[in-house]
Image: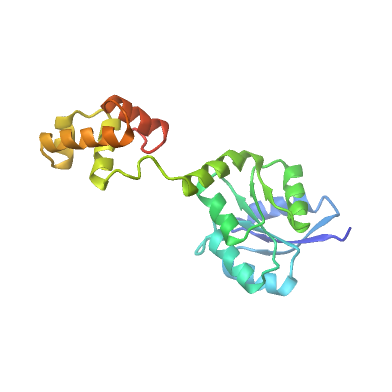
Amino acid sequence: MAQIRILLVDDHRLWRVGIRTLIERNRMFAISAEASSGAEALEQAKIVQPDVILLDVNLPGQDGISVCKDLLLQNPFHRVLMLTGSADKNFVIDAIIAGAKGYILKDADPKALLNAVKCVYEDGNYIDPELTPLLFGQIRARIMPSIFDDLTPSEKQVLGCMVKGHTNKAIANELGLSPGTVRNYVSSICKKLNVNNRVEAANLALRERFVQPN
């Protein structure tokens, strides 16, 4: 098997040194070039034509998602493996949509990182197992209608206050409404959410992670 040439893109030099040391212990892999920004990544990718691009999600000036898009506009045959320091669900789907072939955490097991690189090189797709539940949750959130979609913006505000345990009077004072208006909103919220009372509505909002308590 030919040696897999990698372009390593991250703005932290010490981290790049560590990854280079780790990867080049295995003769199957080689770091052909490094970059610390999106602009450098585009330049180096054009020069070295790497087999796999290890791309950090968080870069100065331009985030890794948009850099991924630019790399694939430059060359649609680039294979991009995204790296992230945290399991942020907001980036997983965005990275896939941007064209990345893989997504892995920086603290993944070294063997898992090498396997991910090899998988992407062979035109496969790789998602860090720790991110799989987040990925499915994000997909459901994007394609499935929410039970809270029918609530008006004002009703959503009132529901947020209900989750905090505020009384109608407290909600009225906080939102600048009359107590009667708040009562009407609470009644409408319960009807739309098909619950019997404000406690059930608040519990539902918490369970479905519509709002978070302070």
Q: Is residue 74 above or below residue 55?
A: below
Give the color scheme: rainbow, by chain, secondary structure or one colour.
rainbow
Q: Which residue in the rendered view is the most extreme toward the right?
A: 1
**In this rendering, position of residue 174 left or right of residue 16:** left
Q: Is residue 9 above or below residue 84?
A: below
Q: Is residue 58 above or below residue 69?
A: above
Residue 60's x, y, as percent?
A: 52, 61
**Residue 182 visible within the image:** yes
Residue 11's x, y, as percent?
A: 59, 59
Quarter of the figure with residue 78: bottom right
Q: Quadrant of the N terminus?
A: bottom right
Residue 164's x, y, as percent?
A: 28, 31
Q: Nearer the viewer, residue 15 or 159?
A: 159
**In this rendering, position of residue 142 left or right of residue 203:** right
Q: Quadrant of the C terminus?
A: top left
Quarter of the figure with residue 178: top left
Residue at left offset 35%, top offset 41%: 148
Tally of marks: 0
Q: Nearer the viewer, residue 68 or 41?
A: 68
Q: Nearer the viewer, residue 211 or 150?
A: 150
Q: Is residue 136 above or below residue 72?
A: above
Residue 106's x, y, as percent?
A: 64, 46
Residue at left offset 32%, top offset 26%: 200
Q: Nearer the viewer, residue 58 or 147?
A: 147
**Residue 40 visible within the image:** no
**In this rendering, position of residue 15 left or right of residue 92:** right
